[in-house]
Image: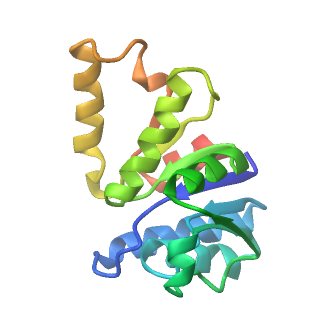
Amino acid sequence: MERIAVFCSASQDIDDTYAEKARELGAWMGDNGKCLVYGGTSSGLMEEIAAGAKAHGAMVMGVVPTIVEERGKTSELCDVVFRTDNLSDRKDTMLREAEVAIALPGGVGTMDEIFHVMASATIGYHNKQVIFYNINGFWDGVIAFLNGLEKQHFAHSPLKNYYKVANSFEELVELIK
């Protein structure tokens, strides 16, 4: 997998552990010839992963909605910027440009991106997966929710066909080599 989409928080007010893990992933991507496809914003984990990737030679592709660009929040670390009209276009562009998606910790926007990838896979638009990078158990609640959907028969097929979980950096690397 050469082009990896990363969904993550743009918040500046989160624990530094998440920033360290984002930089570590970005550095690994650069060291291993991967291309980062991400939201292109200049704050939070988005800027951290881009900084790690760029410092280690990765191609950095930002997918930036017009409203983000108008607010001056586009990262200067992007080698390529895809401009989109809205968040829906952003998700479609990221999905088109990447071979897999990694979910770092994030908020409602990150969850929207994750569910977009999974929902479109369930009906056959693609066969790409989301990898939950479960730093400090961040995604445990979402994973339990997904398991509950299956147990209550709200999923037509096993949802694990559409996602994987990495509880450590080593597990993550194994899934994206």
Q: Tell me which residue sits at (22%, 43%) in the image.
A: 141
Image position of 103 (left or right of 85):
left
Q: Where is residue 131 in the image (x, y as percent from the top left)?
A: 49, 43
User: Tag count in the figure?
Assistant: 0
Q: Position of residue 34 (x, y in %)?
A: 74, 59
Against 126, is 50 above or below? below
Image position of 23 (left or right of 93):
left
Query: Which quarter of the figure is the N terminus placed in?
Result: top right
Q: Position of residue 126 (x, y in %)?
A: 64, 29
The reply to whether residue 67 is in sight is yes
Q: In which quarter of the image is residue 33?
A: bottom right
Q: Tell me which residue sits at (21%, 14%) in the image.
A: 152
Q: Tell me which residue sits at (63%, 46%) in the image.
A: 95
Q: Tell me which residue sits at (55%, 57%) in the image.
A: 6
Image position of 107 (left or right of 118):
left
Image position of 20 (left or right of 149):
right
Q: Decide which of 103, 123 is in the foreground and name it.
A: 123
Against 158, is 13 above or below? below
The reply to whether residue 49 is in sight is no
Q: Decide which of 49, 92 is in the foreground and name it.
A: 92
- Describe the colour scheme in one phrase: rainbow
Q: Position of residue 81 (x, y in %)?
A: 71, 71
Against 16, is 120 above or below? above
User: Which residue, as the protein is rendered here, is positioned at the far front?
Assistant: 85
